[in-house]
Image (spheres, rainbow, N blue to C red):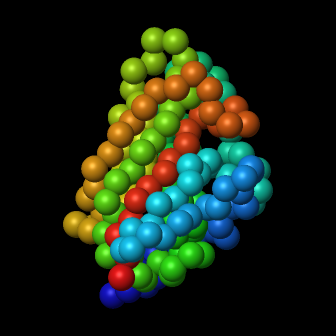
């Protein structure tokens, strides 16, 4: 089964790749790796939410935003090389705009990691960083970037 068929089986439709907000491209291929730029939880051109996790945004909401952001990262890969060229997900880096004292960044970024596991199975298991930051672009609560090995 192709990854595209797996997405359809899960009822997931990849969004269009989000246009860059500044002077960069959504994804770059070097050799057999694709690196994505940081992706926010945009849906049809709008951020799903703004605010800091642990204050304006609950950890459960932020976990859903991480899921949306990783779909945007996959859309960037798809636009560059096609989703079916993915061999495996190598690494995910997740940034969480965190209220003072919030330490649940790993649980938030699980939203991205768990979705990658649902889609790619063993090929979705990856190395990861979950980093708390004071601010993210546009006031977003979560930003995700990934590295994928491709054919």
Answer yes or no: is residue 119 visible: no
Quarter in which the N terminus is drawn: bottom left
For image coordinates 36% across by 74% down, the residue present is 32
Side (left or right) of 129 relative to 57: left
- Return the x and y of residue 26 as percentages of the image width and height: 61, 61
Occupied quadrant, residue 20:
bottom right
Quarter in which the C terminus is drawn: bottom left
Marks counted in the figure total 0
59 versus 119 height, above or below: above
For image coordinates 34% across by 54% down, the residue present is 91
100 versus 65 height, above or below: above
- Return the x and y of residue 145 as percentages of the image width and height: 49, 51
Depth check: 123 or 36 in front? Answer: 36
Depth check: 132 or 104 in front? Answer: 132
Occupied quadrant, residue 103:
top left
For image coordinates 48% across by 70% down, the residue present is 29
Which residue in the rendered view is the most extreme toward the top? Answer: 101
Which residue in the rendered view is the most extreme toward the left? Answer: 122
Answer yes or no: is residue 4 visible: yes
For image coordinates 59% across by 75% down, the residue present is 79
Occupied quadrant, residue 122:
bottom left
42 versus 4 height, above or below: above
Side (left or right) of 14 relative to 132: right
Which residue in the rendered view is the most extreme toward the bottom? Answer: 1
- Return the x and y of residue 135 as percentages of the image width and height: 62, 26
């Amino acid at each position: 089964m192709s990854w595209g068929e797996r997405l359809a089986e899960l009822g997931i439709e990849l969004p269009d790749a989000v246009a860059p907000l500044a002077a960069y491209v959504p994804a770059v291929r070097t050799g057999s790796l694709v690196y994505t730029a940081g992706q926010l939880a945009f849906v049809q051109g709008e951020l799903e939410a703004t605010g800091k996790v642990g204050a304006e945004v609950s950890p459960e909401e932020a976990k859903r935003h991480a899921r949306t952001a990783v779909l945007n990262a996959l859309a960037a890969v798809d636009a560059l090389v096609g989703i079916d060229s993915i061999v495996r997900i190598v690494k995910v880096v997740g940034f969480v705009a965190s209220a003072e004292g919030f330490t649940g960044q790993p649980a938030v970024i699980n939203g991205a990691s768990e979705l990658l596991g649902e889609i790619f199975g063993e090929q979705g298991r990856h190395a990861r960083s979950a980093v708390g930051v004071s601010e993210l672009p546009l006031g977003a609560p979560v930003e995700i970037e990934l590295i994928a090995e491709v054919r």
